[in-house]
Amino acid sequence: MRGCVSRIRNTFLNFFRDRGHLLVPSAPVRPRGDPSLLFVNAGMNQFKPILLGTVDPRSPMASYRRVANSQKCVRAGGKHNDLDDVGRDVYHHTFFEMMGSWSFGDYFKEEACQMAWSLLTEHYGLPVDRLYVSYFGGDAAFGLPPDDETRQIWLEIGCANRILPFGLKENFWEMGDSGPCGPCTEIHYDHVGGRDGAALVNNDTPDLVEIWNLVFMQYNRELDGSLRPLPQCSVDTGMGLERLVRILQNKTSNYDTDLFTPLLDHIHQVSCVDIYGGRKGSSDQEKVDMAYRVVADHIRTLSVCIADGIHPGMSGAELVLRRILRRALRFCVEVLQAPQGSLAGLVPTVTHILPAFFQIMDVINENEAQFLSSLQQGSRLIHRTLNRMENKHGLFPASVAWSLHRDLGFPLDLVDLVLEERGVRVDREELDRLISENHKSGPQSQLSLDILSLSELQRLGVPHTNDSLKYQYSLDRDRYVFPACCAVILALYDGHSLRSEVSEGQRCAVILDRTCFYAEQGGQSHDQGYFTRNGSKDVVYPVDAVEQVGGYVVHHVTTSECLKTGDQVELHLDQVNRLSCMVKHTATHVLNFALRKVLGPSIQQRGSHVSAERLRFDFTTKVSLSVSQLQQVESCVMDVISANQRVYSEELPLLSAKTISGLRTVDEVYPDPVRVVSVGIPVSELLNDQTDKQTSYSMFSLCGISRIVAVTGRDATRARELGQAVAQDVDSLSARLAGSTPSSLVSAHCLAKEVGILSDVSIHDAVQLASSPLFYRVCDPSCA
């Protein structure tokens, strides 16, 4: 079969739909609730809750058995990073589409191999004599036998002498250091043909490439490195659309296919160089063709990411995207000699090749204009720090380097380069410590229930936790009253397996029949508090963390005395902590409402987090907010608070909740039913009225990017007082500087020292503090 890209994609999807697979849409490239990823980089990312056994039993995903889709993927930064290879060859990309099929406890190896072979040879018409298959040949050191079952399946299909064994690196797939894993079998295609290409398989040869990987998840990798059989086997297959299109359109390069040629033609029209020639390596001396490939690849990635709400910024995925943008700009301007604005001008061509995107050109142009100012700001800070260093050739403070990276979004390699030019190097040991401290995971991670323990809980018939009491508080004479909660211990987990008893001094996970504690979810921190055990009320069991996994609320506890299944306990909620979170959670929704009212309906929430100390709110905006706009937003928030309106809540079926006009959600998988909270109007009225009333409401569990960090109550008052004090110091110093020339060198030095001290405090932040009791810091990654 030969044809256009859409026909190739649809053939894949229709093939699996006709064989009982549910077609699901691609997830956004911004990962849903997975802090381990910068971007979605594989088709299986959105299905990790199923594979790990943590999927909410109330969500539609819990019913998935056979699934297929074409997933948008970005591999730039993190473990899977193709960014530095893009442009050097003709097949690496930062953005690509991964067409995939999955079986969750349904079919396994035989049917997966048969369907893959049928689609490639019968429907796409690939020549059988150009296909090779690899399988896992075993590993004696790890006690893993060869996957002879898969080898036999391929023999019966008819692959004959084109079946090749490989080791762990090539043909054993693992999700991470722990979790589901298993052997895989890969299908490879020989672009040349008419030869014995067996020796070229998995040999980094561009003419013989892997096109489809079939993963058979049958083991679970334990924290100690051992493997245990999974209670339910799954299949995860993935085939890159770009590589398949290259084969079916009979091209020697991915960049010669319909996915890229319109972009390369457009780039030539706006550049001052020769037409794209497909050269690479030493034959591309001026790196012109490399620049063509870099710009064509990167504008696709930028378009997809910005459309999915990831804007160039100062940390995480946003920082990586900014690096991609600036890499594309450098090649565009310096090598291709294209005028300013040319990069954004390519977006309409991308929309003809890929699904439509919105507001992308404005974002790219805005960041292009800010590129130089960001570099200048960071360079000034480096220069000022160097001037203060007593030893001009000593170690540059790691804290400053880390601040440049964390707060301004400076790539650390750029910091190293600037310092190298001045004969200085950063304190690498201290910087590594800061990086490690920033990325280390919390202690609760080792107590998270794995898929085997979750399966054992289900086998034992342990019911899901009833956590309805967390919402059953009431307001009595202007004071919140929280219900008492007594519960029974149903299960104990020590980080490795379920236990009937845990001894004194151990950290363990406790599953109760009911709880009043709020688990970490919906952007809100977990509750704090402790247990007491019946018969021993004076012994306290502190709760370190609370999480929800697969329908179970898991309390992380350090045991003061022995705990056993069947023990009756009383839960003691830290009510001050909960009330602080409640205030900030409601404030988050009111802030969302106020931003949309002041800045318009184009503002979309892209994330939030609520703790007892503060709230954080991320939202889309093309430019940073002015002081005046922030004051308007705060005024709107304060008006809502002053109105002292009632807060209504109601649990609704997911489909009913989505009919509420103007409901704001963020992109994630929601449970069914969901809890809807409304300020000022009963939820029942919202269901019956399709007008977007002036109120703030959002699903409680739903509960380019700018970020607002805010405090409330007494903390807001203290923040305002601090800001006013800083502003007064700035005014005083400004008056003295403007009043007269320093009388001596000593007084000049004193003034310079005062300026330096105040310069370490962001003047912009001081203005915000002085004028706003709510906002104490505004971070806008797009301005960095």
Image (spheres, rainbow, N blue to C red):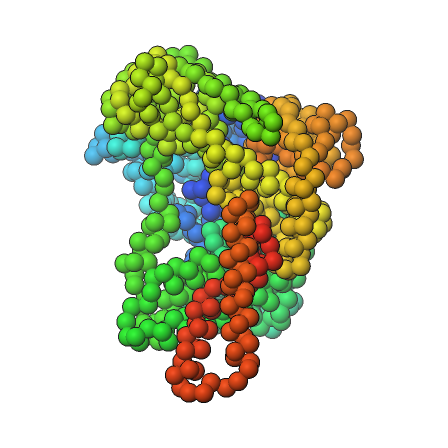
Residue 529, x across and y down, in percent: 41, 29
Q: Is residue 309 visible?
A: no
16 horizontally vs 287: left or right: right
* Residue 757 in view in this figure: yes
Q: Position of residue 459 (x, y in %)?
A: 39, 14
The residue located at (41%, 49%) in the rendering is 78
Seen from the viewer's position, the closer of residues 105 and 400 is 400
Q: Front-most of 26 and 90?
A: 26
Q: Position of residue 365 (x, y in %)?
A: 63, 63
Up the image or down, 74 lies above or below 162; here it is below
> How many numbered marks does the figure carry?
0
The residue at 55%/45% (across/down) is 712
Q: Nearer the viewer, residue 135 or 297?
A: 297
Q: Is residue 147 left or right of residue 517?
A: left
Residue 510: which quarter of the image?
Answer: top left
- Residue at 69 percent across and 25 percent down: it is 656
Q: Percent position (x, y) of residue 481?
A: 54, 25
Q: Which residue sits furthest left?
A: 141
Q: Relative to the observer, which residue lies in front, 532 or 351?
A: 532
- Determine whether, in the image, residue 153 is placed left or right of residue 711: left
Residue at image location 61% in from the left, 58% down from the top: 771
Which residue appears farthest toward the front when viewing the image?
A: 477
Where's the N terminus, which quadrant?
top right
